[in-house]
Image: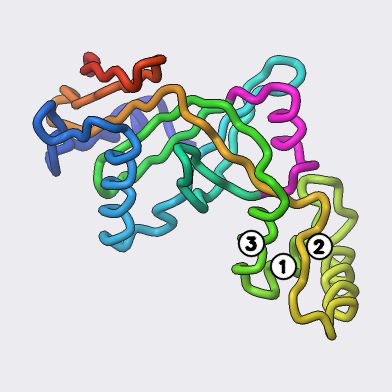
């Protein structure tokens, strides 16, 4: 069992880059795309992975990892089963938080915003780009619902594979959809030596984005 002393001793210095008033973009979306591009070009595993935090009906936080699948019209898109717990939580409390963390680049981005359902045409267009086995999987899995056994899931996959065997374009299930998160806040964090990190926060106002440096 790991001791508190062992855990406390885990430490590294951050020295790869800096972030200052001269290098950071005026618009947070430009800065996010810049960092996303660098994460992708660096060959990082799952560079578009982001933690999605929601609120349960009881007021408890809930978090899981989803994948960013688009940035359009000032909104971040991701797709999932809309009948899952996260979908139900968003329906009740649309305020959400997102976190990107690229450890290899010593960077983190926090985002807070409002999530809304994407229209079915947009969902269908993205669903059509998914590999066929993933499309079948979306039909076979009722995400997060109790599953008696792996065999039950595999039988569902076989059943839908047969059902859509002669279907060229598989439609998205009615319980599968997507969300657009409209940010109201961004925070960019660049690790620096001695824990004197660079942090910048953008807040949305009626006149656009207001940016300020934060203490580490």
Q: Which residues are magenta?
A: 80-95
Query: Quarter-wise, where is residue 54 in the image?
Result: top right
Say left or right for 207 vs 12.
Answer: right
> x and y percent of residue 171 in the render?
77, 66
> x and y percent of residue 105 in the render?
25, 46
Q: Counting other residues with Cα less than 10 Å from the Cα at mark 2, is it few (<14), some (14-19), or many (20 or more)? A: many
Residue indicated by mark 3: 125
State if disc 2 and disc 1 touch (CB < 8 Å).
yes
Residue 139's disc is 2
Q: Nearer the viewer, mark 1 or mark 3?
A: 3
Compared with 148, 118 (above or below) is: above
Residue indicated by mark 1: 135
Depth check: 38 or 25 in front? 25
Q: Counting other residues with Cα less than 10 Å from the Cα at mark 1, is it few (<14), some (14-19), or many (20 or more)? A: many
Query: Quarter-wise, where is residue 161 in the image?
Result: bottom right
Say left or right for 127 vs 205.
Answer: right
Residue 45's disc is none
């Amino acid at each position: 069992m790991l001791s508190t002393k062992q855990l406390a001793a885990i430490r590294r210095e951050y020295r790869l880059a800096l972030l200052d008033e001269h290098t950071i973009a005026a618009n947070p979306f430009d800065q996010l795309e810049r960092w996303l591009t660098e994460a992708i070009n660096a060959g990082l595993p799952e560079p578009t992975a982001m933690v999605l935090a929601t609120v349960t009906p009881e007021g408890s936080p809930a978090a899981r990892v989803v994948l960013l699948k688009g940035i359009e019209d000032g909104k971040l898109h991701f797709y999932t089963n809309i009948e899952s717990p996260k979908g139900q939580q968003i329906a009740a409390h649309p305020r959400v938080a997102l976190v990107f963390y690229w450890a290899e680049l010593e960077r983190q981005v926090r985002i807070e915003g409002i999530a809304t359902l994407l229209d079915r045409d947009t969902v269908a267009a993205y669903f059509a780009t998914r590999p066929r086995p993933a499309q079948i999987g979306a039909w076979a899995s009722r995400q997060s619902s109790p599953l008696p056994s792996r065999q039950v899931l595999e039988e569902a996959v076989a059943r839908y594979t047969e059902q859509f065997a002669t279907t060229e374009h598989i439609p998205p299930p009615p319980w599968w959809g997507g969300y657009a998160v409209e940010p109201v806040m961004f925070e960019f964090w660049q690790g620096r030596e001695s824990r004197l990190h660079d942090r910048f926060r953008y807040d949305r106002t009626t006149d656009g984005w207001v940016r300020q440096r934060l203490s580490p």
